[in-house]
Image (cartoon, grey):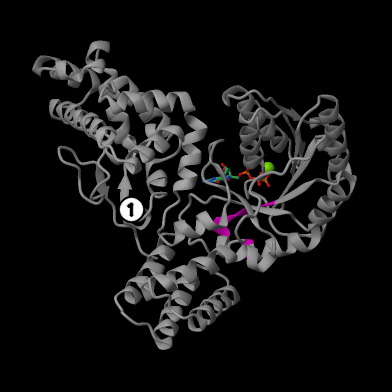
Amino acid sequence: MFERLSDGFNGVFRKLSGRAEISEANVREAMADVENALLEADVHYDVAKSFCKRVLEDAVGQEVTKSLKPGQEVIGIVHKRLVELLGGEGQPAGIMEVSPGPTIVMMSGLQGSGKTTTCGKLAATLKKQGKSVVLAAADLQRPAAVEQLQTVGAQVQAEVSGAGSVEVYAEPDKVAAYGKAVGVAVKVCQNALKHAKKSGADVLILDTAGRLHVNAELMDELNRVNKTLQPHQVFLVVDAMTGQDAVNSAKEFHDQLSIDGVILTKFDSDTRGGAALSVKEVTGAPIRFIGTGEKLDAIEPFHAERMAGRILGMGDVVSLVEKAQEEVSEEEAESLRQKMARGEMGMDDFLKQLKTLRRMGPMKQLLGMLPGVGSALKDVNIDDKELDRVEATINSMTAAERRKPDVIDNSRRKRIAAGSGSETTRVSQLVKQFGAVNKLSKQMANLGGAGKAEAIKAMGADGMGGMMPGLGGMPGFNTKGSTKAAAGGKRFKQRKKKRR
Ligand SMILES: Nc1nc2c(ncn2[C@@H]2O[C@H](COP(=O)(O)OP(=O)(O)OP(=O)(O)O)[C@@H](O)[C@H]2O)c(=O)[nH]1
Ligand SMILES: [Mg+2]
């Protein structure tokens, strides 16, 4: 989402880094470029102006540290101010639960911003953590709204693993009364709370109605729910695609409801990111989560410092590790690490890794979290279908072949290729790359040196042991020279995006 903005920043930094000394005029010029980049990204005018002013003041007031290159110094200042703009360091991310429960969370937002979907995503996250959740169908505008939440709730309960449970509280018969009498939605919320208390739920999430625009009727209803239920947290769900409009309506919501945080959805879309950068400064309410897709697991707690890192092309390894931790247990990671250290990873282990990796999200999104990779990938279309092909190839191998791919001779290769609808050259390529990864991981493990050993150990302990080989040297998937096709097969298809 921040590709163009990252480009803008990178261009500015490149210019600065070539200089041995940086004058005030250089910084001023750089900040004019940054301001343009921000405005192009649809950042609110006042926000862009004041951001650049602050950076300029910091940079001019600062004596450039001797050990740092002047360009880096400016990057450091921009990073610090960007973190601040996005909400500051150490802000609590996610839901803050109260004890005794249930913690009441109220969703609010315009029509179609993603409230109902986000209810499901939050419920899924909580269920994974072993929490039980009640979702209240307080959007009574249409019967379909109630049904949508019921479907989402049932899907979470059925599909998301975790010790917790998710239940939907709904009174579909109240839909008819809605609009004829005030307070119908409030009543449903009150009943839902009673129900949540009785069933000992940890969290109650209220899915409220939306309107196309902020209007008195909507605000009156939300205010009533807010006053009566006294939610512990009121979230405003904002569609990142709607840019400045979103930011302006967020301000109105905040003035009325004094929201605790914003959930910015549709982060996966091709928007310019202005909303994300302006919303905290304009409304004063921090971003708490971002929605990154339509699926139930497409949600991330928002961390200002990590997001600033992503924007400036420094990557976000911490979030990547956290994603990995959700998917891989420590024991699994350790066992794989040991196998890899012996150069004995089998195709089955690899297939498992690949599946885990793919559960974490689209490849491009994951790779974008690695330092320096984000902007390099902007015009590259990483085809996740290639990975389907790799999976199909492995699936066509016998157990013995998977354990020891060395046994794959010409006739086996033909059989595997035919079985997976692939070509023999692709099969050999996969086997060859696979062998190379095994050899490399064994060498890495035997390299010695405390630093190396520690690094490898740390990788294993946090689940990355199973992840990094998959990212860096994954057979059949070449991430080096990302714009080029990998040897033996076109892994990346160039796709020039239309410039707006
Ligand atoms: N790509 C993408 N789509 C999303 C995201 N969040 C929600 N959506 C989609 O946005 C559309 C609207 O989502 P809903 O959850 O129904 O929105 P709502 O705020 O409940 O809408 P109303 O109840 O009509 O006010 C759906 O098609 C969702 O799949 C996201 O993070 N990324
Ligand atoms: Mg809804």
Towards the viewer: 344 or 199: 344
Quadrant of the snapshot with the C terminus: bottom left
Magenta stretch contains residue 302: no
Of all residues, the one furthest to the bottom in this rendering is 25
Look at the picture and state if 413 lies above or below 353.
Answer: above
Q: Is residue 150 left or right of residue 29?
A: right
Q: Quadrant of residue 393?
A: top left
Q: Main secondary structure of the magenta part?
A: helix
Would residue 397 be visible to someone looking at this image? yes
Residue at left 49%, top 45%?
A: 319
Q: Position of residue 183 (x, y in %)?
A: 89, 45
Q: Position of residue 192 (x, y in %)?
A: 83, 33
Residue at left 48%, top 52%?
A: 269
Ligand 1's quadrant is top right
Q: Which residue is mark 1?
A: 377
> Which segment is the magenta one?
236-246
Towards the viewer: 348 or 247: 348
Look at the picture and state if 357 lies above or below 412.
Answer: below
Q: Secondary structure at mark 1?
A: loop
Tag 1: residue type?
Answer: Leu
Magenta stretch contains residue 242: yes
Would residue 1 be visible to someone looking at this image? no
Towards the viewer: 411 or 99: 99
Q: Quadrant of residue 361?
A: top left
Q: Position of residue 332 (x, y in %)?
A: 44, 24
